[in-house]
Image (tube, helix red, strand yellow):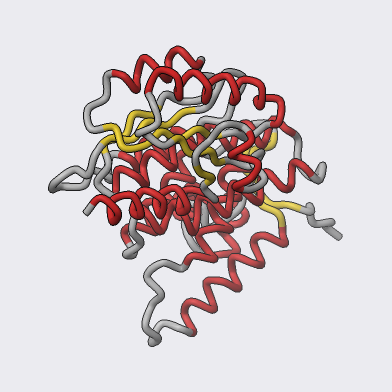
């Protein structure tokens, strides 16, 4: 009697699904079916194939219902799978399908990308995945957010300029890329200096920006605090008190903590930063 392998090749999976090999391969590349390369060969576990078959059956049973254009929960699961497998093309297809189904760039970033990266970060912190997987996912997502930003150009009157970056020692570019994209959608001209930016570079950029409204500094590590204090002190000396400096990021505890480090305000996530800018505009109106 033949003993079945705990996983299947894509060709074997295609036979069970009743489709051709290339259709099954497309399911993998667009993030619908989880597969892993072993020795250069794509393999699918029995569990994942059964889950995929069940999801297909469920979609067929619901074919007469109004579709949920965003299917956020499914996209989150699919994107996490692609990023964990290092599948950049598949991850982009997941994002593309969500937008083709009606999701806005803002929705994709806040409701799909951010939750996925938070989950991956938590899994790494809990020892469930290697740091290489977390770094790989962040690198892929940073590139894809750059592609999303091409769709984030808002036509119409611009509201002013915003400077963002991370102080010397910071290594996380993704949070800045997401914030930059979201701010552009809101009509702001954004200069993203990226992480690991010295205080002098912040000053140099700020002094040359037209209609500078605010400066945002992202801090994800407590080891960066000395550089944060230095950067904010130099900015205040060179730029003056009229341009507010906002601190955000996972290492900043609350508004009081931000003020102790020298900031004018504290922003909780990208949405908090946008809300702060909206408040500034309302006051000046």
Q: Quadrant of residue 115?
A: bottom right
Residue 15 percent across, percent down from the top left: 57, 60
Q: Observer-nearest residue: 116 or 284?
A: 284
Residue 167 appears in the rendering: yes
Q: Is residue 106 above or below residue 57?
A: above
Quarter of the picture holding the N terminus: bottom right
Q: Residue at x 77, y 42 (%)?
A: 125
| 253 displayed left or right of 185 | right
Residue 184 percent across, percent down from the top left: 30, 43
Q: Residue at x 78, y 52 (%)?
A: 5
| 148 displayed left or right of 227 | left
Quarter of the picture holding the C terminus: bottom left
For the image, the number of numbered tags is 0
Q: Is residue 47 above or below residue 147?
A: below
Residue 141 appears in the rendering: no
Q: Residue at x 31, y 37 (%)?
A: 213
Farthest residue to the bottom: give it: 64
Q: Observer-nearest residue: 61 or 212?
A: 212
| 24 displayed left or right of 65 | right
Residue 26 percent across, percent down from the top left: 45, 51
Residue 110 percent across, percent down from the top left: 47, 55
Q: Residue at x 47, y 48 (%)?
A: 270
Farthest residue to the left: give it: 156
């Amino acid at each position: 009697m033949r003993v079945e392998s705990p996983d299947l090749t894509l060709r074997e999976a295609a036979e069970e699904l009743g489709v051709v090999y290339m259709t099954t391969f497309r399911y993998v590349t667009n993030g619908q079916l989880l597969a892993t390369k072993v020795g250069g060969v794509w393999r699918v576990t029995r569990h994942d194939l059964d889950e995929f078959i069940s999801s297909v059956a469920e979609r067929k049973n619901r074919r007469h219902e109004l579709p949920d254009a965003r299917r956020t929960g499914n996209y989150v699961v699919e994107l996490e799978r692609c990023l964990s497998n290092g599948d950049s093309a598949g991850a982009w297809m997941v994002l593309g399908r969500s937008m083709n189904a009606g999701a806005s760039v803002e929705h994709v970033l806040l409701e799909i990308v951010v939750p996925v990266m938070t989950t991956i970060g938590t899994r790494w912190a809990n020892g469930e995945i290697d740091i290489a997987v977390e770094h790989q996912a962040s690198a892929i997502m940073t590139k894809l957010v750059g592609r999303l930003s091409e769709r984030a150009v808002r036509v119409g009157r611009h509201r002013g300029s915003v400077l963002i970056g991370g102080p010397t020692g910071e290594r996380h570019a993704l949070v800045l890329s997401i914030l930059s994209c979201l701010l552009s959608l809101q009509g702001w001209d954004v200069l993203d200096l990226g992480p690991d930016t010295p205080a002098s570079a912040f000053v140099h950029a700020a002094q040359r920006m037209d209609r500078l409204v605010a400066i945002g500094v992202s801090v994800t590590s407590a080891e960066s605090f000395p550089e944060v204090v230095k950067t904010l002190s130099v900015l205040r000396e060179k730029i003056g008190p009229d341009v507010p400096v906002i601190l955000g990021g996972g290492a900043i505890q609350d508004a009081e903590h931000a003020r102790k480090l020298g900031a004018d305000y504290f922003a909780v996530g990208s949405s908090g930063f946008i809300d702060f800018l909206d408040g500034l505009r309302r006051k000046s109106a």
